[in-house]
Image (cartoon, coloured by chain):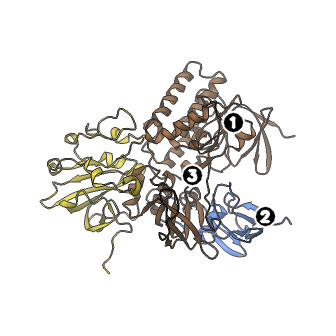
């Protein structure tokens, strides 16, 4: 279905999701790359030995979740903007989801934004914990969202146009 | 409409220039093509076809397709997608083949 | 009589393939002249805001316009490379003279070798009112937005979910323009799915097995009627939707710009997998006209990453044939060939490989 709609299915997502135990331990990269294309910058970005080297440049990325410290370098390097960092250890009820972002306006830390899922469906209003600039060359921002723990594997972007005001 | 804020690109616009479209004054920037300046001003009907008199607009923007031919300073059939704006330029909607004066 | 410019290697087209060819040939010591019909070098690279795929060797992770700037810089800083911009090549003659036009002047060039890197042009599809203002090729939208910083309208219908349709949709949203939908007649998305997912999560529907029935509007586009297709690509009655859009953007494929190949009497073949008529050539990209090489989309429509490698391969091969890089060139050729086969080895590259096999198959009709 992904190749008809652009929306990864629950089964697709399952194949790249670490165990609940690993998720609870702390930040980890979720690489939502489901198609063999000639691309390998993530393997070169990872200095932790978490993203394994590819035999063939068309291989799908392979992770060793235990080596991942959630540094987020891969997130800002992935040309497909397909990498997210999820930290389910943030608090008892909340998780942090870090998303790559290349639109304007860039949300500000402390502001509230509308989070959306992989289909662009609104999931609620969430607080922005932090915003990291990718720098003058990379330019991809990383936006840290505080979301309810059970939504950590669902929130994947922000509704464009920033905050939506109540009617 | 011109883009003021972009997440990836910085637009370095040249000096402000004024030219004329069917007698109307249009503001643009040095380095822009006539097509770009007209689109920034909301003009997208550039001429009419010869037989059916159908409106013609920009299509390829790289000088390939000849959809954007206009009369520039009296010269017909100028590809305005690759012709740059100049101060005081007279750009006119072209009807059909245009004619040489 | 205008004077004739002598040069070792003439490169026609200053996009990713042409610039890579220029740099590679000049690095081996050859003197190169690049003709570019636009005022600025870089071709379509300068309009690409996304990060490129591939590996480090093809600048993966850098954005298209950044790669463009890098290639332009490499050529501008190389004393062996001369660039004539705003110059349009007109013809390649039997005596080897190439003619060109600049500022209304007719120019003559006598190169020892020629590399054609003329790229591709946008395809059109048939539907009522497809000639209306407000209907643009995807490349035109990129030029307006990413070169001039001007948006084409307020709300866009994108036709085609190949890489160009997906990328330009994303660029429209980055410029603050709403994309109403991306429609694709094929039953599956043709472009990279990571691009598709990025656009989908921004809320843009991607409708496969959908086509445009007609555009409408008084003097320019005010809307479009789209409908669903069945598995025989026929419109399903009752599935029509009326989309209020002021821009329809066509990203329905590219055709190799091969006029000069035909005119130079290269043997040509129609290969759908390579997107049209393309010249026969050997592994080192030399056509059936000795000393005439091709690189990039003119040799078959593909990605910019492979266009750059092809450019490099053609540049090395042309310089080598002039006696440059006696020891080094064969090694560099082998490296480029290995990169090309690596880039094409996955599922995404199968179409190109099949096309090249068909092209070089001696059994089929030539023209």
Q: Is residue C181 left or right of residue C123?
A: left
Q: Which numbered circle lies on residue B76?
A: 2
Residue underneath mark 1: C366
Q: Is residue B76 left or right of residue B25?
A: right
Between circles 1 and 3, the one closer to the viewer is 1
Q: Is residue B52 left or right of residue A99?
A: right
So how many labels did they put on this image? 3
Q: Nearer the viewer, residue C82 or A112?
A: A112
Q: Colour of chain B?
A: blue
Between circles 3 and 2, the one closer to the viewer is 3
| Structural distance between the alpha carbons of marks 1 and 3 | 23 Å
Q: Nearer the viewer, residue A58 or C84?
A: A58
Quadrant location, the C terminus of chain B: bottom right
Q: Marks 1 and 2: in contact by CB < 8 Å?
A: no
The chain displayed brown equals C
Answer yes or no: is residue C150 visible. Answer: no
Q: Marks 2 and 3: in contact by CB < 8 Å?
A: no
Question: Residue shown at 76%/41% (left/top)?
Answer: C91
Give the SS element for disc 3.
loop
Task: Using the image, determine if residue C353 lies above or below residue C127.
Answer: above
Give the SS element for disc 1.
loop
Residue C191 on image: x %, y %: 46, 50
| Structural distance between the alpha carbons of marks 2 and 1 | 40 Å
Q: Colour of chain A?
A: yellow
Q: Residues within 10 Å of mark 2 (few under 14, many from 20)?
A: many
Classify residue B87 by image quadrant. bottom right
Residue C95 on image: x %, y %: 80, 32
Q: Is residue C274 left or right of residue B20?
A: left
Residue underneath mark 3: C253
Return the residue found at the far bottom. A167
Question: Residue shown at 35%/38% (left/top)?
Answer: A44
């Amino acid at each position: 279905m992904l190749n008809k709609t652009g929306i990864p299915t629950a089964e697709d997502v399952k194949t790249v999701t670490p165990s609940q135990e690993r998720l609870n331990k702390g930040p980890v990269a979720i690489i939502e790359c489901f198609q063999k294309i000639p691309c390998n910058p993530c393997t070169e970005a990872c200095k932790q030995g978490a993203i394994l080297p590819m035999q063939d440049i068309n291989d799908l990325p392979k992770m060793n979740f235990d080596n991942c410290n959630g540094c987020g370098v891969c997130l800002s390097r992935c040309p497909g903007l397909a990498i997210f960092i999820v930290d389910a250890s943030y608090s008892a009820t909340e998780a942090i989801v870090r998303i790559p972002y290349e639109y304007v306006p860039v949300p500000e830390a402390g502001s509230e934004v509308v989070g959306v899922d992989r289909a662009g469906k609104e999931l609620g209003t969430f607080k922005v914990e932090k915003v990291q600039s990718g720098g003058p060359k990379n330019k991809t921002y990383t936006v840290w969202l505080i979301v309810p723990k059970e939504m950590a594997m669902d929130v994947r972007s922000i509704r464009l146009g920033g905050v939506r005001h109540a009617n | 409409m011109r883009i003021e804020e972009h997440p990836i690109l910085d637009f370095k616009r040249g000096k402000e220039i004024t030219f004329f479209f069917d007698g109307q004054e249009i503001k643009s920037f040095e380095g822009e093509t006539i097509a770009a300046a007209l689109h920034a001003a909301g003009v997208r009907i550039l001429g009419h076809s010869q037989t059916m008199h159908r409106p013609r607009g920009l299509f390829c923007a790289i000088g390939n397709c000849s959809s954007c031919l206009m009369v520039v300073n009296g010269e017909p059939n100028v590809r305005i997608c690759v012709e740059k704006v100049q101060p005081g330029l007279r750009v006119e909607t072209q009807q059909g083949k245009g004619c040489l004066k | 009589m205008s004077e004739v410019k002598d040069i070792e290697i003439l490169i026609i087209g200053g996009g990713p393939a042409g610039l890579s060819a220029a740099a590679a040939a000049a690095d081996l010591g050859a003197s190169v002249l690049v003709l570019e019909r636009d005022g600025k070098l870089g071709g379509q690279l300068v309009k690409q805001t996304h990060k490129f795929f591939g590996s480090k060797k093809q600048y993966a992770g850098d954005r298209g316009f950044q790669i463009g700037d890098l290639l332009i810089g490499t050529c501008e800083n190389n004393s062996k490379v001369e660039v004539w911009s705003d110059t349009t090549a007109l013809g390649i003659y039997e005596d080897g003279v190439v003619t060109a036009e600049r500022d209304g002047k007719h120019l003559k060039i006598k190169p020892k070798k020629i590399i054609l890197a003329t790229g591709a042009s946008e395809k059109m599809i048939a539907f009522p009112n497809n000639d209306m203002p407000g209907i643009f090729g995807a490349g035109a939208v990129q030029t307006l937005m990413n070169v001039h910083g001007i948006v084409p309208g307020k709300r866009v219908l994108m036709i085609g979910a190949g890489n160009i349709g997906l990328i330009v949709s994303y660029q429209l949203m980055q410029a603050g323009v709403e994309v109403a939908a991306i429609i694709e007649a094929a039953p599956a998305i043709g472009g990279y799915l990571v691009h598709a997912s990025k656009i989908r999560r921004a809320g843009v529907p991607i409708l496969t097995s959908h086509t445009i029935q007609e555009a409408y509007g008084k003097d320019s586009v005010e809307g479009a009627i789209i409908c669903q297709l069945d598995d025989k690509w026929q419109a399903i009655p009752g599935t029509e939707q009326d989309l209020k859009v002021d821009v329809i953007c066509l990203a329905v494929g590219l055709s190799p710009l091969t006029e000069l190949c035909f005119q130079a009497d290269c043997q040509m073949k129609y290969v759908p997998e390579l997107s049209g008529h393309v010249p026969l050539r050997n592994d080192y990209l030399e056509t059936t006209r000795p000393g005439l090489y091709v690189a990039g989309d003119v040799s078959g429509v593909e990605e910019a990453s492979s266009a750059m490698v092809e450019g490099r391969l053609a540049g090395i091969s042309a310089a080598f044939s002039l006696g440059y890089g006696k020891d080094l060139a064969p090694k560099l050729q082998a490296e480029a060939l290995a990169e090309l086969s690596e880039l094409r080895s996955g599922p995404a590259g199968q179409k190109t490989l099949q096309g090249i096999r068909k092209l070089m198959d001696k059994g089929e009709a030539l023209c």
